[in-house]
Amino acid sequence: MYRNGRGVPKDDQQAVAWYRKAAEQVYGSAQNNMGVVYALGEGVPKDRQMTYFWWLLASAQGNQRAVQNRDLVERSLSPGQRATAQTDARDWKPKTPAQSSKL
């Protein structure tokens, strides 16, 4: 809602905060959205490695958009960037609601 300004003022940083909170709790669509905001630089700096990281996580949840997007961005990364993001995704641990990012 914050990303599109539906019912609330448009606020990219609030959108990212809510996406992150849900993504940390293994919601695949929120993980996909985190990849999108990093790809576009909406509320966060553009970062292809972080884009790839979030799309790796969302892909593991079966999010088909993330699978397609992951494969596209993967080609633009160096082997080192890919390896780092893959290691980070493999080592990533979900958080409980109490542990996830504060709003």
Image (cartoon, rainbow, N blue to C red):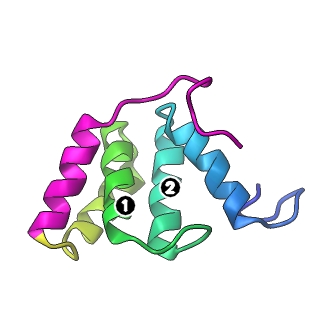
Give the residue pinned by disc 1.
50
Residue 25's disc is: none
The span from disc 1 to disc 2 (Cα, nearest Å) is 9 Å
Q: Is residue 90 magenta?
A: yes
Mark 1 secondary-structure assignment = helix
Left or right placement of residue 3 versus residue 31 in this view: right
Query: Height in image: 37 above or below 7?
Result: below
Give the residue pinned by disc 2.
34
> Which span is picked out in magenta?
79-103
Residue type pointed to by label 1: Met
Dot placed on the residue nearer the N-terminal end, 1 or 2: 2
Q: Position of residue 82 (x, y in %)?
A: 17, 61
Number of other residues with Cα within 10 Å of mark 2, as a class: few under 14, some 14 to 19, many 20 or more: many
Q: Position of residue 64 (x, y in %)?
A: 37, 50
**Which quadrant would residue 3 be assigned to in this image?**
bottom right
**Which quadrant would residue 79 be assigned to in this image?**
bottom left
Number of other residues with Cα within 10 Å of mark 1, as a class: few under 14, some 14 to 19, many 20 or more: many
29 or 82: which is nearer to us?
Answer: 82
Query: Height in image: 15 above or below 18?
Result: below
Q: Is residue 54 magenta?
A: no
Q: Position of residue 87 (x, y in %)?
A: 19, 46
